[in-house]
Image: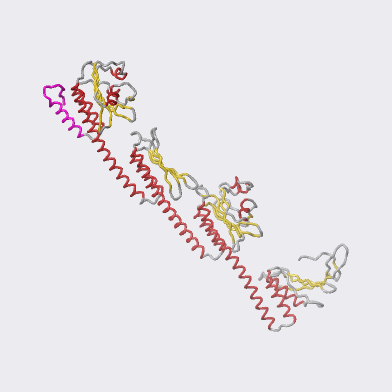
Amino acid sequence: MQSRPGGSEDDSFQNFLLEFSAAATRLVSSAEILKLFCRETRNYFQVSGAYVWQLLPPDQLSGVEADGWMADNFRGSLLRSCESAIANEAVQKRECLYINGLDTSRYPMAAEFRVRSIMAVPLILSNEVLGAAVFVHNADPDFFRSDHAAKASILATQLGGLLESVRLSERAREEQRRASILAEVVQSLHSEPDLRVLADAVADRLRALLRTPLVCILARGQERFDLWALGELVPPGALLAAPFRTSTRDGAVLVYPRREGPFTTDEKSLLPIITSFAAVAISNAELYSTARAQAHELHQTLNIASELGSIADLDQFMQRFLQRSSQFLGYARTFVAVMEDDTLRIRWSFGEGNRAPDGFPLPEGNLTRAMREKQVFRAEDASHLAGAHTELLAQYGVRQLLAVPLLGITGELSGVFGLLDHREGLRISDEDVRRSQALAAQVTVALEVSRNLALSEQHRRKAEALTTLALEINSLLRGREFARNFVARFAQIMAAPVAGLLLEGGTPSCVLADAVADRLRALLRTPLVCILARGQERFDLWVLRPHSPSPTSNCFRPSAARLRLRWKTRASSCAWNRPTATGSKSSTPFPTS
């Protein structure tokens, strides 16, 4: 393509057009076509330089390609529509213009390039101006003719068609790429149940679709913000954001600027579409995660209940329960306290570090007040609460504390189930509270069953004593044997520490006193039982005391000693008297052994 204009043959320009079109069709990008256009047209017109401006709406021209004189200085230069330049005039008039003998004082850029002659032709396609092509000669002040302008207009029209063809091809390929990515997004997002993997997949697809170095997904849950990011270093520029909402959280997808330039309108419209897909997928992943967590929790709870259901001993039950609860909930220490004499005392504990001894009373304060009000107590740092027992908390190394009240069948407070310090340092969540309440119900059932068994055993013993007493009464027993059996059964039924039969106007027999004392000593497992009777003139006292144990037995043999006591009336004091070995009286207080 070395033909020159103005030759004897008119088909030289047509040959140049055919050769240029054939070469351009083999190229795949607009940048390569513009480079070919500048090089070949400069050679064909024999000018000093060929340049192409691109119109950037609304009123700016950008130098995109050049060949020849000061080409490197031209690329990247900017020209506003208000500036005086032959290219601006050609774009505004939409016709080819050329000036020979150029007045450089009127055109500053031409003066910078030391131009003597210049020609500019607008690039128009479908009545839309795309830019302008400019040709200059820096030696001949009278170079351009009307023939140059006509041929330049034809070349500009052909260049516009080639650029549009490339643009449509690139758009078709881009649409195909986006469609494939969207299809992949839909398929991959709806088949991925893991939330973390899903967020990474969304960010990765958006990076590929928008060609951006960084995509972030920011989601706000009930207690915290989650941020998923995938990308590289970010250049300065505009940031795109698309909000979304799922069943449990709100968030936004953030697309950071890219090096290829600003985002197009089509690319901006794609972001909300993919974000909506991602929101549905994230909602499904959240539901799946919740269902899977609840199924795992139910499985663990059933395992704990099944394992504990086979343990009959209460102490063994509690130790195993606290161990499994610590593993299930992820806390370092657990304990169970019971209510005894209006005081909460720790009876069972499990875990690492310093633990309170069995029977340790919980001091009155924030914890006991919440338990008495039948409320769950939770503290991330118990030492920072008002009125906290800081020395006690420091002694046992307590920071996090979660306590659940144990309520009996009638609603009264029967104890506390407590957890101390999460192993992973996490905050106490609502899930921890709910799970601990579910486990506390098992402790409550165990304590109620143990209490009911104790009451049942007590009632059984009373029923047996009543039955035996009824049988003995129906057997028409008389005298000492009847009195002895009656007092023994009465003491057993009433669970009384002392019982006796006092007869008005008489004195109980020694045999009856021996029987009563013997039954009471056996029932209460006590080494000493006394029976005191007051007559009209005196007190009678029967004492059942142990003899020294025999070498082969640890049991006591009962024997009765009758002590006669007289009442001495004094204004200041009363004293017990008993006969001494020689018959004299002693005024010493009544001995306790």
Q: How many marks?
A: 0
Q: Position of residue 164 (x, y in %)?
A: 25, 34
Q: Quadrant of the C terminus?
A: bottom right
Q: Quadrant of the N terminus?
A: top left
Q: Nearer the viewer, residue 516 or 325?
A: 325
Q: Quadrant of residue 75?
A: top left
Residue at the left extreme of this rendering: 8
- Report if residue 7 lies within the magenta region: yes
Q: Left or right of 304: which side holds 268? A: left
Q: Position of residue 545 (x, y in %)?
A: 74, 70
Residue at 23% across / 26% down in the picture? 38
Q: Position of residue 58 (x, y in %)?
A: 34, 30
Residue at 66% across / 58% down in the picture? 342
Report whether residue 140 is seen.
no
Q: Position of residue 478 (x, y in %)?
A: 73, 83
Residue at 51% across / 65% down in the picture? 310
By what rule are the colours in the image chosen? secondary structure
Q: Nearer the viewer, residue 531 or 473?
A: 473
Q: Which residues are magenta?
A: 1-26
Q: Nearer the viewer, residue 164 or 419?
A: 164
Report whether residue 5 is seen.
yes
In the image, residue 329 sits, relative to residue 233, either above or below, namely below
Q: Quadrant of residue 360?
A: bottom right
- Report if residue 580 lies within the magenta region: no
